[in-house]
Image (tube, rainbow, N blue to C red):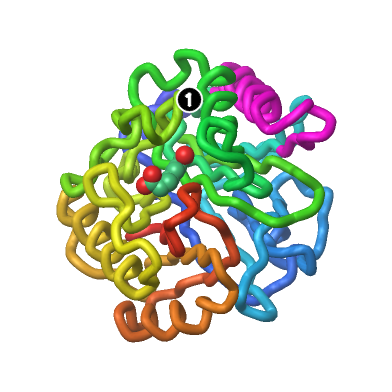
Amino acid sequence: MVQAGENLQVRLGLSRTPHVTYRMADPGTVLTEPGTLAAFGFGTGSPDSDDPRWLRVALESFDAPAPIELWQVDATVVCGQQEAVRWSSGGGWLFAAVEVNEHEAGGIESAARQAYAALCQFMGTRDERCVLRIWNYIANINDGDDDAERYKQFCDGRAAGLGDFFANGFPAATAIGHHDRQHVLQIYLLASADAGQAVENPRQVSAWRYPRQYGRTSPGFARAMLMPARDALAISGTAAVVGHASAHEGDLEAQLNETLTNLEALLATADMPAGFDTHSPLKAYVRHPTDAYRVREILQQRLPGVPVLLMHGDVCRRELLVEIDGWRY
Ligand code: 3EB
């Protein structure tokens, strides 16, 4: 009876969304805190750890020293590694990460296919089947022209590795280019035992309906994902895309303003209050390091008090100079 009651309680309440924060700390400290589901360091200077919950993201941060990103749940966390997939789980939540070296995989397309096939296979062994949010960090994302551009090859490999895994709907996602010399493809995700609700942006064509000019394989992602308990919105990489076209080519400030308008449209569509606050950790990915200062200045003015991590990252369309993703709690 006691056991049945415990199970019932677990099933009745949808688990609170993991708490995502940035903090100046070292991995040793945060990983010993109870409830730490995952922790991320940024850039080549960040420390390494064998803990499966620790990931050194290949992107450099413009903040020096960079804080750590922390995902915390109100539950006991267990973790491990299953073949290429490092994972942790607790309270109905699952973190999973895979890194594939392109040189070993035979190129970006097969690296993406292998990485997604490994993640799908792993997810099949878990109770937390609902993938809500995925991050993809890809070396030299804009190298190659037209259909041979590396981002487009990544999209092909991702779709091949996934098969029909997202037949019932895509998760929210980010795909950003890094400049780490290792040619490593990094993918990590957040999944739950409970389904979320995908949110599209009425100002934008859904990514999976992009016309052929953007590649053979449309990118499979939702613009945002409302978490199962409806206590947070996970926002995909958002740039100055209106309809399906890139807006304001060559104009950083106009692109940033359009991006902020897109973010507000997502909040409104998800029935969330307008604006971001001190509990809404965002990341701004900036293509040109020389733009970082200006982006910080504009965001401090437009989003006062909002924790924004400034990253050196390339948006998957060459003409886009900046992209923002993150959380609205
Ligand atoms: C865009 O709006 C920008 O391929 O998973 C944003 C978020 C973008 C995710 C992905 C791509 C992806 O089309 C690009």
Is residue 249 within the magenta segment?
no
Rendering quarter of residue 228: top left
Specify the amino acid type for callout 1.
Arg
Point out residue 300 in the picture as x, y percentages from the top left corner: 38, 83
Number of numbered discs: 1
Residue on which disc 1 sits: 129
Please tell me in which quarter of the rendered image ligand 1 is found. Answer: top left
Mark 1, residues whose alpha carbon is within 10 Å: few (<14), some, or many (≥20)? some
Point out residue 306 in the picture as x, y percentages from the top left corner: 38, 76
Res 266 seen here: yes
Does residue 285 sit above or below 13 in this rendering?
below
Point out residue 151 in the picture as x, y percentages from the top left corner: 55, 39
Q: Specify start and end residues of the magenta stretch as a single range.
A: 99-126
Relative horizontal placement of residue 288, taking residue 250 as reference (left or right): right
Does residue 294 sit above or below 192 in this rendering?
below
Q: Of helix, strand and loop, which one carries label 1?
A: loop
Seen at 23% across and 69% down, the residue is: 275
Quadrant occupied by the N terminus: top left
Point out residue 10 in the picture as x, y percentages from the top left corner: 41, 34
Seen at 47% across and 18% down, the residue is: 165
